Image: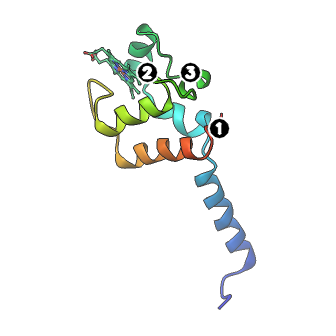
Amino acid sequence: MADLPAAAIKAFEKKLDDRVNLSFERDIQPMFRDNPDIQHMKARGLDLSDYNQVSQYRAIGGALDIFRRVESGNMPKDGPRWTMHMVYTFGLWIKLGLKP
Ligand code: HEM
């Protein structure tokens, strides 16, 4: 039932590819608010705008720890809680290989 033009299917596939090719710069970093997330956490030694810090598997402050905290609502401390979409995007970014 190929009733869609090939170009339309191609365009849709490109859109899906963009959805799953998550990158830190385009999809993850913008989820952290400059203030207070980045500013407050930088003062505590974790730079959420720095790919090299966020992409580590460190027990404290690494990607898995950040995921755990935003999923549980422990961070950001002042709220509001991340939406499920944001949490899943972050988790999928980890699963897809922590791309810059
Ligand atoms: C993953 C490791 C993290 C650690 C160990 C951590 C730890 C802390 C600690 C100790 C504080 C001091 C406030 C308190 O606990 O009473 C704090 C504040 C804060 N954190 Fe985090 N945090 C982490 C991740 C994050 C993330 C991922 C975000 C944002 C998405 C975030 C956003 C904030 C904000 C906005 C504050 C300031 C709240 C305020 O003073 O109004 N933190 N964090």
Q: Is residue 53 above or below residue 10?
A: above
Q: Residue tagged by mark 2?
A: 60
Q: Is residue 11 left or right of residue 75?
A: right
Ligand 1 closer than 8 Å to label 3 CB: no
Outermost residue toward the top in this view = 43
Q: Amino acid at mark 2?
A: Ile
In this view, the mark in front (2 or 3): 2
Q: Is residue 53 above or below residue 26?
A: above
In this view, the mark in front (1 or 2): 2
Ligand 1 closer than 8 Å to label 2 CB: yes
Q: Position of residue 11 (x, y in %)?
A: 69, 66
Q: Is residue 35 left or right of residue 51?
A: left
Sequence order check, earlier mark of 2 and 3: 3
Sequence order check, earlier mark of 3 and 1: 3
Q: Position of residue 8 (x, y in %)?
A: 68, 73
Nearest the eye: 8 or 48: 48
Mark 1 falls on what kind of element? loop
Q: Position of residue 91 (x, y in %)?
A: 48, 44
Q: Is residue 20 above or below residue 9?
A: above
**Ligand 1 sits in quadrant:** top left
Q: Amino acid at mark 3?
A: Gln
Instruction: Return the mark for residue 99.
Output: 1
Mark 2: few/some/many CA within 10 Å (<14, 14-19, 20+): few
Q: Residue at x 68, y 60 (%)?
A: 14
